[in-house]
Image (cartoon, rainbow, N blue to C red):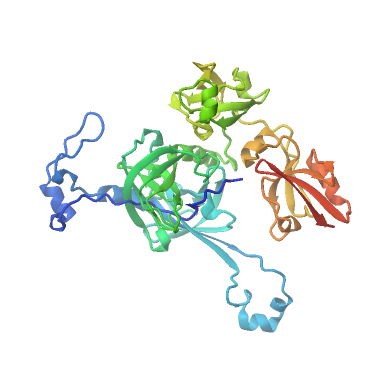
Amino acid sequence: MRLALRHVLFAALGCAAGLSAALPVSNFEPARARAQSAPAVPAAAEGPAIPRNRAEIAYSFAPVVKKAQPAVVNVFASRVERMPANPLLDDPIFRRFFGEGGGMPGRSPMAQSLGSGVIVDPSGLVVTNNHVIENMTDVKVALADKREFPAKILLRDPRTDLAVLKLADGGAFPTMELGDSDALEVGDLTLAIGNPFGVGQTVTQGIVSALARTHVGISDYGFFIQTDAAINPGNSGGPLVDMNARVVGINSAIFSKSGGSVGIGFAIPVNMVKNVLAAAKGGGKLVRRPWLGATLQTMSQEIAEGLSLERPAGALLADVEPKGPAAEAGLKRGDVIIAVDGQSADDPEAVGYRLGTKPLGGQATLGVLRGGKKTTVQIRLTPAPEVPSRDTVKLKGQSPFSGATVVNISPAVVEEMSVQGAANGVVVSDIEDGSLAQQLALQRGDVVLAVNDQKVETTRDLEKAAASRAYYWKITIGRGGQVFTTVVGG
């Protein structure tokens, strides 16, 4: 279950922060004239050259925009809402005057969502945010040239808040190249293109304000590019673009008290996008990532002092699965992971991101602190095992679980659904709209631990318990690492 950051707004975004030179108004001549009069900026051997005068900063982003903008799209998603049963709506005279939706104020048969996206393959593959199309069934995409196409949802990845769409056949689509988010540096110029507030495609500009932002609470892989570019509702899923017109991130959320941009926006690094895109191209419905087989804990100052560390950085191994990759590599409780393949990892989110961007197969090198000394270990990049098998069951009847689909718990299910603190029970994988389970407020990822004081070990245990008749139901649920018990009438 995702953590909700107090002021993080999940809205469709876009990105912008104006680069404004402190020049008199009279100095802002047209860009073309400036380009003709300004001397050429000398190429630097390492990195961009620092502007030496006002003429050298009087440039335009137009060439970058012209190259990138055609591949940016608007995403329109919708679903038909199931209206509560009402005999009046079945009256033919009522329908004649008010239509199938009832025509009543405040009642709409459709739920809608607006966001942005970017075409990353000529065949029409579009990357956007999962929250833009979450729970939606119909998706349409509008290109910059005003063409519109229906889109099929190829893959949803709630863990990263990413989704991949496929446009209906329309020939070769304009695309944007994927860059390398690990090559970004704080201070790099970036553009964000999207559809803020539905006003139409808009370009904004800013810099990379920070890298490797964690503890943001947006997705399971909390590792984000922070930008001061103005990101607003409607731009979710739009690209963060570098000065070579390449995608370096997918804009996802803002930190805001008002709902508008205050210059703190977050983008998913494109290196995470690449794994999701590869899974979609391979026909997968799930993104399988390397499994560490260990529980990581954030380092505090007290823990760091207890381990004689100079600073509270790294991810502490609080528990290790006996047969997981971490155990096979010789990692133990109390070890601290500080790097993955030479890239620093200051907290569990960073370790998860670094491993999550690695392809399955092969090995990764972990930098580890053990007993105050640095060492390295090799860990296999294998997916979490699905043992026991899921044995998926959809519950029916008149029990409070009717309409819920459940699966057996396993390391693969724990990873996929971000189940916290549960080793036993069965996991709710889906809830049917309007069902008794939905009325009970069950959620995807909940772990059913016991029914009427009887432990639930497998999906068949729950199916048997749900099939019985009872005057009341005493249900014990695990959610977000906490255990709750409730009693409902039979």
Total marks in image: 0
Judge left or right: residue 129 versus residue 53.
Answer: right
Is 415 in front, or is 125?
415
Which image quarter: residue 319? top right
| Position of residue 207 measured from the top left corner of the image (x, y, whole percent) | 32, 44
Which image quarter: residue 96? bottom right
| Position of residue 388 measured from the top left corner of the image (x, y, whole percent) | 74, 33
| Position of residue 243 measured from the top left corner of the image (x, y, whole percent) | 30, 42
Position of the N terminus, as image quadrant, is: top right
| Position of residue 114 measured from the top left corner of the image (x, y, whole percent) | 48, 59
Residue visible at 34% across and 35% down in the picture? 185
Is 337 in front, or is 194?
337
Looking at the image, residue 67 lies above or below residue 85? above
Judge left or right: residue 112 versus residue 176.
Answer: right
Is 71 in front, or is 270?
270
Q: Is residue 363 visible?
A: no
Is 438 in front, or is 176?
438
Which image quarter: residue 288? top right
Looking at the image, residue 94 lies above or below residue 224? below
